[in-house]
Amino acid sequence: MESSAKISEEGGELVRRHSATARTVLAMLIGVVLLCVVAFVGKKFLTQRTNPSLDMAVRISILIFGLSSIALRRTRFSAMRLQDIGSLQGPVGLLATLQRTTIQVALLAAVVALIGFSGTLFTGNDFYTYAGGVVAIAVLLYAYPVRRAWEVAVRRFASNENLPDSPAKSA
């Protein structure tokens, strides 16, 4: 009886954390699209200025932040790490890790979009916003939390068999 109450409590926690994270990522996705729209509409109000050093800095920053956000997600969601978190902190700790990492990756994507938009503001070239927007959208879609994947992760890495004080493990 206690086991079924714990499972339903964890299911509620999963739904709550997943929906909050999905809404956050979706809001950032909408924000990135709005930045691209603002750059398109404001293009006629910006003066074109060439700045080769800023050009390279913006392009490299977009590339570095985009790749590092993917590396962060892959590192934080590695199977061994999730297994350790699931066995030490249980399902709630695992869900907190999934939520925190997804939001951190989404924030890196937002930083990419802001770097591109600021490059557009400084140079008047809207390409920076579009390039940063494409990279940010790709990262946000990559980081979008899939509920089924979270359920599988909780079942796999934080099941009762993985917990140290589980009676099934000592038998």
Image (tube, rainbow, N blue to C red):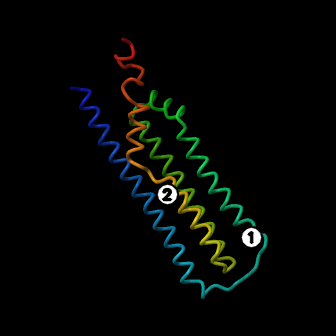
Indicate the quadrant containing the N terminus: top left, top right, bottom left or bottom right.
Answer: top left
Q: Front-most of 47 and 63?
A: 63
Give the residue at x 47% y 41%: 97
Give the x, y percent position of residue 73. 55, 46
Give the residue at x 57% y 67%: 133
Give the x, y percent position of residue 159. 38, 29
99 lies above or below 61: above
Can you identify the residue that label 1 sits on?
54
The tag earlier along the polypeptide, 2 or 1, is 1
148 lies above or below 33: above
- Label 1: state its secondary structure: helix
Task: Indicate which disc residue 141 carries.
Answer: 2
Within-10-Å neighbours for mark 2: few <14, some 14–19, many 20+: some
Name of the residue lying farthest toward the left: 1
Give the Cα separation between the discs numbered 2 and 1: 28 Å
- Label 2: state its secondary structure: helix
Task: Indicate which disc residue 75 carries.
Answer: none
The picture quadrant where one finds residue 96 is top left
Give the x, y percent position of residue 43. 60, 84
The amino acid marked with disc number 1 is Leu
The amino acid marked with disc number 2 is Leu
**In this picture, residue 74 sits left or right of residue 171:** right
Indicate the quadrant containing the C terminus: top left, top right, bottom left or bottom right.
Answer: top left
Q: Front-most of 147 and 86?
A: 147
24 lies above or below 158: below
**In this picture, residue 56 sits left or right of residue 165:** right
